[in-house]
Amino acid sequence: MAEIDEKYNYAVVTPSDNEPRRLWKEVQEDLLPSGYKGWRQKITPVIIALLCITPFALIALIASITYISYLADKLGGNPYAIRVNMSTRSSFQPPRLRILHSGRNLQPRLMRDFPDPTLVEDHNGTWYAFATNSGGVNVQVARTVGNIVAQGKDQDTEQSQNQSDSDPLGPWTRLGIDAMPDRSWTSGRNTWAPDVQALDDGTFLMYFTGEVPNSHRHCIGTARANNVTGPYVPDPKPWACPLEEGGAIDPSGYVDEETGRRYVLYKVDGNSKSATWTPCGTDVRDPTMRTPLMLQQVDAGDGTTKIGSPMKLLDRLEQEDEALVEAPELRRWWDGTYLLFFSAHCFNDPRYNVKYAWANRIEGPYVRAEGALLQAPDFGLRAPGGAKTGRTRDGVDFIAFHGNCPQGRCFYTVPYVEA
């Protein structure tokens, strides 16, 4: 049966669950002679069933593909608009993801220091990126080049012409502004990993990591703005600040498309509990150290009012992750599976990477996929991490991340698919 999903503009084709049963019943009633005894009676139906079901399944597959090709024309011929769900894997098996790239070295979208990038699409369809402080700017901002209004032209006309050109997989430009110049409760140094969410009332909410004064530990704050580029005005107090556990960093907002519930993910920064500061908090392996990735439900309207207590989704495994896991990011895959992306190892370690885990429920349990999605030296990358994911209006899934470069940690985007 085929359905057109108007929200994501793609056709889903799923074979009928009753088809194999019907064929097996026909085999039993029509094809199996009544005089078979013993082992022949047991093995013959299996052989006949395999011989009969395979051709029928092949015919059904060909017919389904032909029909969705017709649906593709009705959807506008978009090559990304068709997704076929043939139920080829069990719901207990994770989606196996791979980066969609030609194999040559990936080139940065921004050849400058732009760490821990996050992306948001504004209400007009323009993509913006925000990043950790650098170059004297508390929160950096970038924008897709396709939506920049040329000087001397009518802004409304130029904007409407460029809406379709806002491609997160295309060129970007850094804007010379500070999205959050007000330091509020923070020390004004080391403002990390901002995450911007568009709210239903037309305003924008930023989660950010701020350094606590007179300390090397961090807490998570919130800030609001009427425009996507700011200026964002911080709330007077931190939103999450478990200092006894090491603090909290790397916030990431998520809205569950299925339920409409809003959540915030973050990392409890257990590796920063050491008395002396080092790039990742400690140079000593501590088997008792915890850096859990947490999930907190919040009010869907304001994005900050907490609902219930935070839940732990995943923690470090010393043999696989060493010092930590961090940078949580949640995405619901096309089949309903929840994908939890995260980074492992210290950010200045060449082995810094992007991994993912999966679950059938948002609260888990999450099962790690084998291997890393992004790691050095794949695609010429060095220490890729701090990833966020997105999905274009054409249904293209992509991942944004930073990787080491001569300028610091440069900004990349690349599509990914199920292998």
Image (cartoon, helix red, strand yellow):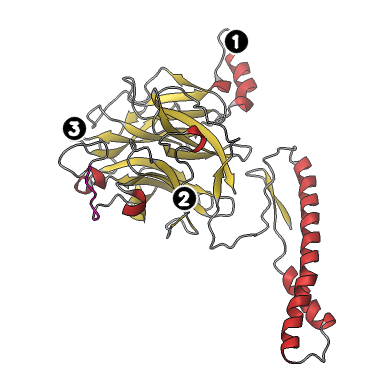
The magenta span reads 282-288
Name the N-terminal-most of marks 3 and 1.
1
Residue depicted at x 55% and y 45%: 98
As helix, strand or loop, the secondary structure at mark 2 comes to loop
How many numbered circles are shown? Answer: 3
Q: Which residue is drawn at 31% across and 47% down?
A: 324
Residue 400's x, y, as percent?
Answer: 48, 35
Q: Image quadrant of residue 160?
A: top right
Q: Which label is found at residue 371?
A: 2
Residue neighbourhood size for the residue with mark 3, other residues' Cα within 10 Å, grouped as few (<14), some (14–19), many (≥20): few
Q: Is mark 1 on a helix, strand or loop?
A: loop
Residue 137 position within the rendered picture, expressed as x and y whole percent measured from the top left: 33, 21
Residue 66 lies within the magenta run = no
In front of the other: 168 or 342: 342
Could you say which is closer to the camera, residue 387 or residue 1? 387
* Residue 186 to residue 19: above or below: above
- For residue 272, say whether it is visible: yes
Q: Do the residues labelled 3 and 1 touch (CB within 8 Å)?
A: no
**Residue beneath disc 1:** 153
